Amino acid sequence: MSQENTEETQATETTETFEPKIMAFVCNWCTYAGADLAGTSRMEYRPNVRIIKLPCTGRIDPLFIIKAFENGADGVLVSGCHPGDCHYTAGNYHAKRRWIAFRSLMEFTGIDTRRLQFSWISASEALKWVDLINNVTDEIKALGPFMDFKNLKG
Amino acid sequence: MSRIGVFICQCGTNIADTVDTEKVAEEMKKIPGVVHTQDYKFMCSSPGQKMLKEAVKKHRLDGMIVSACSPHMHEKTFRRACESAGINPYMCEIANIREQCSWVHHDKTKETGTVKSLDLTRMTIERLKKNQPLKPNKIPVNKRALIIGGGIAGIQAALDIADGGREVLLVEKTPSIGGNMAKLSETFPTMDCSQCILTPKMVEAELHENITLMTYSEVEKIEGFIGNFRVTIRKKARYVNEELCTGCGDCWDKCPFKQDSEFEHGLKKRKVIYTPFPQSVPNIPVIDAPNCAMLQKGKCGVCAKVCGPKAVDFEQKDIVVEEKVGAIVVATGYDLMPNEHFGEYGYGRIKDVINGLQFERLASSSGPTGGKILRPSDGKEPQSIVFIQCAGSRDEKKGVSYCSKICCMYTAKHTMLYRHKVHDGQSYVFYMDIRSGGKRYEEFVRGAIEKDGAMYLRGRVSRVYEKDGKVIVQGADTLSDSQVEIEADMVVLATALVSRPGADTLAQKLGIGYDKHKFYNEYHPKLKPVETVTAGIFLAGTCLGPMDVPESVAQGSAAASKVLVLTSSDEMIKDPTTAIVNDFTCNACWDCVVACPYSAIEKTDIKDREGNVIRRLAHVNDGVCTGCGTCVAACRSKAIDLKGYTDEQVYAAINAF
C-alpha cells in the first residue's frame, strides 16, 4: 500500500472511530499512587492510557518520549510529584527543566507540543488524574493520529 | 532463553467482572518466551501462592508476571513467593490490571478492560525479559554514634543510644553540656525545677560507660555516608588539663579579671577562667583566651600559681581528631533573636527591658539574684512587670513569620513565678493570641490569669520608654478598644526563637537541608520527622524549629531509636535499585554528580602503577544512592543505568506498546 493511501484511511478514521494511544510516564510515589487511588475510589476514565512506572520523573530520559512516539503513541504524558513534594527531594525539578528544553526541541522538529503534556499529580489527587486523562484523550483525539513517525517507518 | 510464567488474577470478581482473564491467559501464551499462563480467583491467597510455587517448579520458570492489583499492594507478597520457589525476587513483575484497569473501566462487555489488560501484561512481559537478578546491597555499619549538641535533646538521644549498648560521642560547642534548658528556672506546666530534672541526666551522660563527652569542641568536617562517616572534630584548647583538674574552683576564685557571663545573659560577671555555671558537666574550667592577660600579654598567671594539681596549661593547643561513626544526630538547639531587632521596645537601651531567658535567670535560685526577682538597673524589687509577647515572632516585617510556640506558655509561667515571689506584684501581658495547645497547657494559662492575677491585654505595644526610673509601656487593648499606658518597673520580651548562628554552615557540611530561617528540614514533616535526606543523619530538638522541652526529649528518643535500628546489625540491607556506572563509557563530565540530590556519586581516580592519575570516573555509592534515577537521565554518554529500571527494560516496555 502506498503512503498516500495509508494517510487517507487514517484521516477518515480521525473523525469517526479514532482512539488515540497515549503513553504515560509517571513516578512511583505520587502519580502512580494517585492513579491507584482513582481505581480504589472506582472512578471511571478513558481507557486510552498505558502507564510506565518509574521511580521518579527525574529518571525520564527525553528519548523515552521519542521512542513512545516512534512506537505509535499519539500522545505522551509525564506526571510526577508536585514541586517540593518529590520523594527524592529534587527529581521533579530536573524533569521539569528537561521538559522545558525538550519542548522547544519538539517545536523545532515540528512535532505538535500539545501531544506531550506535563502535570503534577499527588497521591491524593485521583480526581485530577481522571480529569487529566479525559482531557488529554479528548485533546489528542481532536488532533488526530500522530503520523509523522509512522510515515517515516513506511 | 527465558521461561516466563504469566498469572492472571481474577481478584474474585474485582478484575473478572470487566476483564476476560481467560482470554488474557490464552493470548499471553502466544508471546515467545512465555511457557505457562494461568488465571485464578485469588492469586494472593495461600492456595494461589502455592500454585505459583508449584508452577515455578513444574515449568522450570525463571521469571514471573502476576497481572493483578497494584504493585504497591502485593509486589512484596509475590516477590517473596518467587524467592521461596527459588527464583530471584527481582525476576517477578506485576502488571496492574485492577486499580489501573478493571476498577476504572466499567465496560461490562469486558472488551475495554481486556484490551488494556493485554497491553499492560504484554508490556510487562517484554520488560521482564530484560530484567536481571538483583541482590540486596549490604553495607557495613559502624555502631558508634555522634551527637552534635549537648542540650536536652542531644543528652536524651545520647543516653538512649548508650543504654541500647552503643558507643556515643557527644560533641558540645560550649564548655558544658546542658544547653538552654540548664538556664531555665521552672518548667511548664508542672513547675518542676529545670535544673533538678536536667542535672541528673547531665551527670548520667558524663558517667555513662558508653558515652564519651567532648565539650568545648566543634565538628569541622564530615565525610563518608550512612554507617561509615568520618568526622573531624576540633577540640578547642581549654588551657586546663582535663586529666589533672579536680574542679576545686581555686583558679576562678583568684582570677582578677571579669567578663559578662554568657550563661547569665549578661546579668552577672564571670571570671576569665570559668565554668559556665556551678553544675557544669564536666566541672572543668576553660580560659577565655581573648580576655586572658596571661595568654594575651604574658602577665598574670595567677590561676596557674594557685592550682594545686598544676592543671592550668597556657601552652595547650587545639587538637583535631578524626572519629569514625555510623550515625549522626544533630541537636544544635536555638538562640533568641538578637536585641537590635527591638528598638521600639528599648531592648539593649533600657536596662530594665530584658528577654525571656534573662527572666529565667532572675527567677532561678542558682541565678544572679539567688532567685529573687530584682530589676537589673537598681536591684529593686519590681512592683509591676509588663510582658510583651510575640516580640519578633509572627511579624514578617520586623522579625520572623513563624510562631515561636513556647512563649505563650513560658510567659504564663513567668507571671506565676513573679506572683509567687513578689506577692503584691502586678503583671501585665500584651498578647496577640494565646496558643496553649498541649496536655494541661490551657489549664496552666487559665491558672496564671485566674489564680495568679496576671492581667492579659490583647494588643500590641507601640513604644517603651524610660521616665523617672519607670519603664512606660504604651500599647493598645483591642478588646476594650482603647489605648493604654502602663508605668512598669520592668519589661520582659518574649523574643522569637531563631536558629543558631552558623546553622547553615553545619548543614552544608552535613549535606542536609534547611529552610529560609535556617532551621533544619526533616525528611518528611509527618512520617519522617527526625530523619534527613542524608541517610544516617537524624535531627532532634529545636534545630528543627521552635519546640518545648517534652517535644525535644521525645525527638531525642525518636532519633535514638532510629540510630539503634540502624546499628542493630553489622550490615545494613539496602534495596538493590541503585544506579551503576559503566566504567568503559563514563567520560567524567560530572553531570551526574551535579544532578544527584543525595551526593551519592563520587569522583574517583584510576591510577597507573606509578600512582599517576590516568582516568577519572564517576562512582555510585550504594550506601547513599536511593535509586531515583535522576543521574541516569542526566548522563550524556549513557554511562549510568538504574538497576531494576534500566534503559533496556524501559525501552522493551515502550516497544511492546
Image (cartoon, coloured by chain):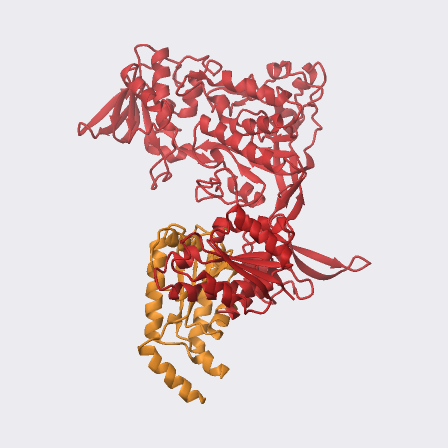
The foreground one among A14 and B572 is A14
Residue at x-position 57% and y-position 40%: B537
The tint chain A carries is orange
The answer to whether residue B308 is above or below residue A131 is above
The foreground one among A115 and A37 is A37
- Count of marks placed on residues: 0
What percent of the width, then of the height, locates residue B453? 28, 16
Q: Quadrant of residue B315?
A: top right
Can residue B599 be seen?
no
Residue at x-position 48% and y-position 22%: B183
The tint chain B carries is red
Q: Is residue B288 left or right of residue B491?
A: right
Q: Residue furthest left?
A: B481
What percent of the width, then of the height, locates residue A65? 48, 69
Residue at x-position 37% and y-position 13%: B380
Q: Residue furthest right?
A: B610
Q: Quadrant of residue B648?
A: bottom right
Q: What is the quadrant of the N terminus of chain B in the image?
A: bottom right
What percent of the width, then of the height, locates residue B545? 44, 36
The answer to whether residue B516 is above or below residue B565 is below
Can residue B505 be seen?
yes
What percent of the width, then of the height, locates residue B652? 55, 67
Q: Is residue B643 left or right of residue A123?
A: right
